[in-house]
Amino acid sequence: MTIFGLLGKIMPYVKPYRGLVTATLTLTFIGSLLAQVNAVVLDRTVDAVNALISDAQFEWTKAMSIIAVITAILLGKEVLAALTTFAQRYFGERMKIMVSRDLSVKVIERMLTFRMAYFSAEDNEPGKLQTRIDRGIMSLSNTVNNFFIDILPLFTSAILALVLMFAANVYVGLVALFIVPVYFIITSLQASRLKGWRKNIFGSRQQLSQGIMSIIESITVIKSFNRENIEAEKQQKLQQQITEQQLQTRKLGFLFDGLKSFVEQIGTVLIIILTAYLVLSGYPGMSIGKIMYHVMLFANVSAPIRQLHRIYDDMNDALIYAESFFGMIDADDEVEHTGKYKGAVKGKFEIKHVDFSYPNGNKALSDITFTIPAGKITALVGLSGAGKSTIVNLLDKFYTPSAGSIMLDGVPLEQWDTAFLRDNIGLVLQKNHIFSGTIEENILYGNPNASHDDVVRAAKQAYIHDQITLLPKGYKSQALQLSGGQQQRIAIARMFLKNPPVIFLDEPTASLDAVATEQIKNSIDAIKQGRTVIIISHNIGQIIDADLLHVLENGRLVQSGTPEQVYAQGGLYKDIFDASARSMNVSKIASVMNA
Ligand code: ADP
């Protein structure tokens, strides 16, 4: 991305604040005019004082009136300048805050529309996304701030100073003008040398924050295995890498800064020598005051140029961060696909020759063909990693098959309106999906318009109501503080509240105790009536109730039929079934129960 590209990208976010922009620009111009006052006053003062002291009839009254005029002008100018700077900075900062707010609202809105594959890509791990968003917003709003508070005022003042220098004397103007491009060349050389380093630092920063997130997420494992040292070492290595990169950038930066300082001093010396020569040789219009005048004007020309590298650095940061930030905002192909079709959902899924690989290349499904009948219970069976959850992911349109087709009630899945489809599917996953918030808020996620009574009814159906009432704050308690099994039942209550015609249950009782499992089984049995249910479970007790089984092995379909038929065929299902019965010690349980 180029600087102009960057400004073009930011413009739409600045546009709504036209009023602020106009105010800032006007103040900028006034500020630039005021910045030249000192030079003009000094020029006139030196000449007036000089004339006065060379005059044989020196008069104090004249001297006092000169001093009074200077004082009035300089003080007046300072008061005006202070007011202008205050207003200009305030408006600039206001704009920065507004733009930063708009950018962050936009990027989050945008991110929410992305398909699941975006979030499972390695480049988009949570810590990396967070850094990308934070840094992006920070450096982009800094660019706005830089532009209106630093660049514009400084450069307007520099251009005005240059015009005044040319007006005073062409040669002096030329010397000042000659220094400017030299400065620019050095600065852009510096920027291009530093660009790679800065990009590396950004990459390392993303890794670092991802690392910190994963430490917090796995703190229990780290502590239980006493692996604090290993984790600290990993962080240390990353830090060391960043430190080296930072030191390198600083070293290069200081080197170039020295060079630029030198060029600037040369400029000042040249201006002094040239003006002194012109004054001494009696060049028309050249008085002693002009030496001060030119030096001060040159300071106004070189001030912004001295800032140039910092602005350049900020700009370069913004270019790096903006690329990945606007990469998110412009990622149209990451936006979730939706069709237009909305029809009463019955729940017959026809899956034909479906292949699927995850974004990281993991092949999860190969040539899967089967049907899930409407209004029936279908169980997906297989060992861990066989591809069962992946099928649920595809049926809920979280991912799109790499090959083959999926139809729901005779309509291709991609033609269904995605939001409508998901309104009609209830999903209970093996990992609890509880948000930070109260129990009531979490259950209400199933239907934000439901009443408190509806919430209580759903909680009762999920066998969690009694436990909730025992909590000191009841339904207003924090849901994240509940146990795994309780959280699971909150998720099930949420599904009861949603009341959809199609239900996917992915290990819904995995983290429940035996009593809760039975209770949930009863309430799931109740909700199953007249609905299409797809259940994934390692619990044989839940599977044998299914009307139909599909058995998966390594991403392929190996058996299909009623539980009895599939068991009679032998093979993987029989192995799983028998192993499950043995692990439960069924014969011993039976003898204990009969005794
Ligand atoms: P199951 O539900 O039968 O235990 P899954 O459908 O979860 O199996 O996984 C099938 C395969 O896909 C596994 O090899 C798993 O490692 C892989 N997989 C699952 N989720 C992802 C993901 N988000 N990214 C990459 N690979 C995945």
Image (cartoon, grey):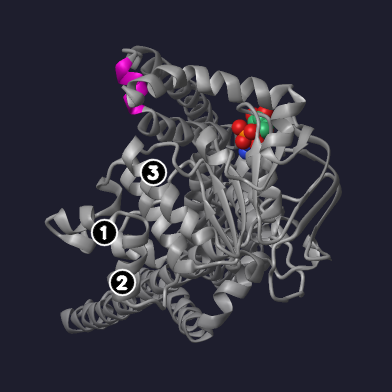
- Kindly identify which residue carries mark 1: 465
Q: Position of residue 301 (x, y in %)?
A: 53, 60
Q: Considering depth in this image, is 142 or 459 the residue closer to the camera?
A: 459
Does the magenta stretch mainly form a helix, a strand or a loop?
helix
Name the kind of residue labelled 1 in the image. His
- Please tell me in which quadrant of the rendered image residue 4 appears: bottom right
Counting residues from the N terminus, which is met first, the one under dot 2 or under dot 3?
2
> Can you identify the residue that label 3 sits on?
518
Q: In front: mark 3 or mark 1?
A: 3
Q: Residues within 10 Å of mark 2 (few under 14, many from 20)?
A: some
In what quadrant of the picture does the C terminus appear? top left
Q: CA distance from mark 3 to mark 1?
A: 16 Å
Q: Nearer the viewer, mark 2 or mark 1?
A: 1
- Residue drawn 36% across and 18% down? 232
- Tell me if the residue at label 1 has its CB under 8 Å from ligand 1: no
Residue 251 in picture, x, y percent from top left: 50, 27
- Magenta highlight on residue 221: yes
Q: Which mark is residue 257?
A: none
- Horizontal and vertical percent position of residue 569: 77, 27
Residue 412 position by quadrant: bottom right
Q: Residue at x 39, y 43 (%)?
A: 518
Residue where numbered disc 2 is placed:
49
Magenta part of the protein: which range? Answer: 219-224
Q: Earlier in the sequence, mark 2 or mark 1?
A: 2
Hey, which residue is sitting farthest bottom in the picture?
Answer: 19
User: Does residue 367 appear left or right of residue 526 in this picture?
Assistant: right
